[in-house]
Amino acid sequence: MLRKEKIRFEDVPKKVTQQMLIKHRFSAALKHHRNSPLEFIQYLFPDQFSLDDFHTKPNGYWKDIKNVRQAIIDLIEREGVAEQDVPRFMTKQRLMGEGLTGLLHEYHGSPIEIIEAVFPGKYDVTEFQRVPNQHWHSPQNRVQALRTFCAKRGIGREELPRLNRAYFRKHFPRFISMVDRHYDSKFYRWIMESFPEYTFQPEEFNLLVGIDGQLCDSKEELEIHNFLIRTVVDGKVEREGCRFVNYEYDEVYIPDWVIEQNGRKWIVEYFGLYGSTRYKWYTEKAGRKMQFYHSLADYTLIVIMPDDFREKGFQRIVSLLISKGVQLHVQ
């Protein structure tokens, strides 16, 4: 087989594949070695090759962090990569070219996760060329990104509440789309999730507290919230209590309110910046939200626009709620 395929003996570990062995009718022999070319070759040529000679590794090999660390450090030293250049050097294409596809698979195809495992806390996500697909779907990755970002810049507990959209627009805009998608544009949620050891007070984020203790983002939302608490009859009003994923746009939606009453559920959304020329993205996302919420069979959507809120005495909001079947106690 080696002569036919013109493979030199020293190249056997890297060039002999399972597909090649099957092609040359070694299927039955492979079965005796768990269909592993590595085990088959080591059986045929004992003590001729080490594990490091093979691209493919035994099952479970990359679960051992010692093996992962050795492979990455060997690659860095062999290529003479400077310490500060490791994140830019360690790309998915580079690892695949080095025959480390199995290692990538073990770490969800993410060079960032591999480097974090080998050098925990040494680099942050901002130093890598790009973030792999699905990276931000992991709460652990989102938390680690902010904690490392803050640690490297000496950002302590007192400064954390000031990390808002304006801050990241100036210092690291790539985080903004992640917060828009996974925290419904609420930076304080990301901060509170990332630093559970701190007891933040609502006023530190300029949040407002409703009459039932739930948090609101603005004075307008606070007024609507307190109105719902006072007027919804024998029902539950929960603010930002659940999350929905719109996979078509890779966005997470957190409804302003969910009302449960008499076995029915309503999503109530206040689009306070709808139509704003300053935040074009807001109106576009609001349209996607409404379309998505309308598609949920278990919920009825109630949309409150700025003009609805500003109508004196909440008359328009009352009519919106009643028209959708919510029972209210109003005079």
Image (tube, rainbow, N blue to C red):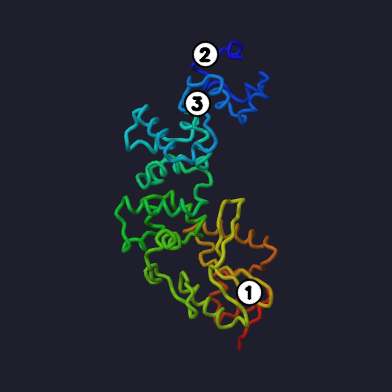
Q: State the image coordinates of residue 104 (x, y, percent, origin top left).
A: 50, 37
Residue 5, by quadrant, is top right
Task: Report crowding for label 2: few under 14, some 14 to 19, many 20 or more residues within 10 A (C-alpha).
Answer: few
On the rendered image, what quadrant is the N terminus found in?
Answer: top right
Residue receiving disc 2: 8
Q: State the image coordinates of residue 167 (x, y, percent, origin top left).
A: 37, 56
Amino acid type at circle 1 is Glu
Question: Measured along the vertical axis of the image, is residue 15 above or below residue 148?
Answer: above
Question: Measured along the vertical axis of the image, is residue 256 above or below residue 232?
Answer: above
Q: Depth check: 294 or 71 in front?
A: 71
**Residue at 37% from the left image edge and 59% from the top image edge:** 163
**Residue at 41% from the left image edge and 60% from the top image edge:** 191
Q: Depth check: 68 or 137 in front?
A: 68
Amino acid type at circle 3 is Phe
Going from N to C along the chain, the mark reached first, 2 or 1, is 2
Q: State the image coordinates of residue 90 (x, y, percent, origin top left).
A: 42, 35
- Nearer to us of marks 2 and 1 is 2
Element type where label 3 sits in the image: loop
Going from N to C along the chain, the mark reached first, 3 or 1, is 3
Measure the alpha-carbon separation of dots 2 and 3: 15 Å
On the rendered image, what quadrant is the C terminus found in?
Answer: bottom right
| Residue 260 numbered mark, or none | 1
Q: Depth check: 78 or 212 in front?
A: 78
Measure the alpha-carbon separation of dots 3 and 1: 59 Å
Q: Depth check: 271 or 64 in front?
A: 64
Q: State the image coordinates of residue 75 (x, y, percent, origin top left).
A: 40, 30
